[in-house]
Image (spheres, rainbow, N blue to C red):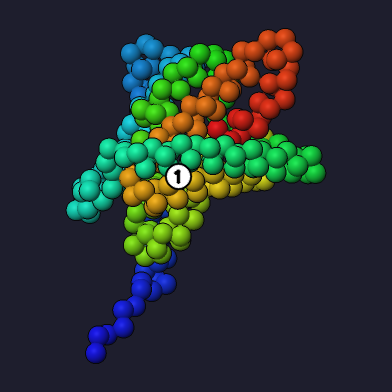
Amino acid sequence: MEPVSRGPDNRTRFWTVAKMAGLGFLGIIVGLLTAVVLVLLLSLAGVSVADRPFLNIVISLVAIQGVGLSIVGLAYLTFTGRGLSFLRARVPSLRDIAWVVGGVVAIFVLLFVVGIAITVINQMTGVEPAQNSVTELASQDPSVLLLLIPAAFLVIGPAEELLFRGIVQGRLREVFGPVGAIATASVIFGLGHATALTGGSGGLAAFAIPLAALSLLSVVFGVAYERTENLVVPILIHGAYDAVLFGLIYVVLTAGGDLGAAANNSSTLLAALG
């Protein structure tokens, strides 16, 4: 008689979540430390980053996405012996492209619903959600958003999805199955953006609202990855989501006249969800 196969016990599940959360935050920390080192090196070379939004964005992309998330992720795959095949990435098929299109539509429908919820919460409680720090830099020089639009596809989407979907969700899948992996990885992804938030009013709620919203929105990335088994799909959805938001914020910051006034009414919401 075949022995009954038992799934991972609670202790294994707990430590897997702890390790994957730690890996996600390690990527962020390494990225932030790399950014500090780059700023110091530039200062020693006589280059100041103060009041230079474009340079700040480049440093952030290189340090956090390029070094922090990507290098930490690839190092994990190397040292654990899992290799790049663990990521399940390939050239998208027509079915994959359909998932990309559907995913982009789904995430913006969800964004609309989340936006309404945040607006209602703001009106009922007076809590102003914290904003992504990119918006602060963009308010000084909106042209940085034009750099971020292609970067969303080339750097931000690939780096974040490699770590949070390819590795974190992939590893969690082994102990929780797809549904548990999607939910847990989405929460870790949302919390990983805490260091990117600034401003707001209402204490912890100002940060909890956009982090919860990002976690919910990222479920779309997780579902797309599990259904297609192709990391390129959530990368493209993620890239499209960020690129469109950067484009909308650019319009908000540069539009004049009546259009500018109307656009500014939604600027805080867009920044919180960016």
Task: Report the residue that reaches farthest toward the bottom.
Answer: 1
User: In the figure, 31 relative to 11: above or below?
Assistant: above
Provide residue 29's location: percent of width, then percent of height: 40, 40
**Quadrant position of the C terminus in the picture:** top right
Provide residue 159's location: percent of width, then percent of height: 36, 36
Provide residue 193's location: percent of width, then percent of height: 50, 40
User: In the figure, 267 relative to 82: above or below?
Assistant: above
Provide residue 207's location: percent of width, then percent of height: 62, 42
Q: Is residue 187 left or right of residue 171?
A: right
In the foreground, 96 or 80: 96
Residue 84 makes an appearance in the image:
yes
Instruction: Tell me which amino acid carries mark 1.
Output: Phe
Q: Which residue is mark 1?
A: 221
How many numbered dots are placed on residues in this image? 1
Q: Residue at x 64, y 38 (%)?
A: 112
In the foreground, 267 or 30: 267
In the foreground, 198 or 38: 198
In the foreground, 64 or 271: 271
**Quadrant position of the N terminus in the picture:** bottom left
